[in-house]
Amino acid sequence: MTAVRESIDVDVPVTTAYNQWTQFEEFPRFMEGVEAVRQLDDRRLHWVAAHGGSRHEWDAEIVDQTPDTRIAWRDVTGKTNEGEVTFDALSPDRTRVNVQMDWEPEGAKEKIGAALGFDDRRVKGDLRRFKSFIEERGAETGAWRGGIGDQT
């Protein structure tokens, strides 16, 4: 498994950062290579992304979601991956967004890319684009405040 751990501080309240992250279908606006995310229900997402020169589709399941604190997922079909995003309030108007992802690179291109740190740079770039996206808007595009209990 390959692992990525990245964080970024955003100049919005924790609730705003968290609420925006619950808008999964907006991910292509700031995540490189993500072509589409379709929310199938409160717990399941269908992803379409280009990575390593190939197009991939898979379904993921949210296994734990606590408003303003954490969203954790794992794959249920396709690309082997799991991870979590946590949100730390640094002040009333500043939040640290932490991403932890683990996945299994497929094929030589993905394995070489992971070894060279391309995945870390992609996630770091995605977080920078998220920061710009949410700070320029100043408000989330929507919110889902429900919780999902840990099923692992």
Image (cartoon, rainbow, N blue to C red):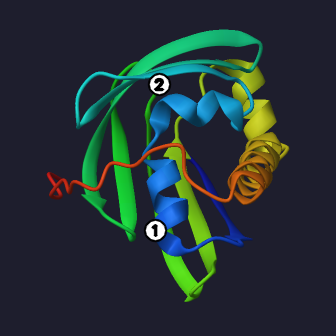
Q: Nearer the viewer, residue 32 or 21?
A: 21
Q: Nearer the viewer, residue 23 or 52?
A: 23
Q: Nearer the viewer, residue 109 or 56?
A: 56
Q: Position of residue 108 (x, y in %)?
A: 73, 21
Mark 2 nearby-residue class (10 Å; few <14, some 14–19, many ≥20):
some
* Label located before the other in sequence (1 or 2): 1
Q: Residue furthest front?
A: 138
Marks 2 and 1: in contact by CB < 8 Å? no
Rendered position, 87 above or below 106: below
Q: Which residue is mark 1?
A: 15
Q: Residue furthest bottom?
A: 91
Q: Position of residue 45 (x, y in %)?
A: 36, 27
In this rendering, position of residue 72 left or right of residue 42: right
- Alpha carbons under labels 1 and 2: distance apart: 30 Å
In this rendering, position of residue 103 left or right of residue 127: left
Which amino acid type is marked by label 1? Thr
Q: Residue at x 36, y 53 (%)?
A: 72
Q: Tag 1's secondary structure?
A: helix
Rendered position, 112 above or below 77: below
Q: Position of residue 121 (x, y in %)?
A: 82, 48
Q: Position of residue 65 (x, y in %)?
A: 28, 57
In this rendering, position of residue 88 left or right of residue 143: right
Q: Quadrant of residue 78?
A: top left
Report the disc number at residue 134.
none
Report the disc number at residue 79.
2
Q: Residue at x 45, y 55 (%)?
A: 19
Q: Residue at x 23, y 37 (%)?
A: 43
Q: Quadrant of residue 13?
A: bottom right
Which amino acid type is marked by label 2? Lys
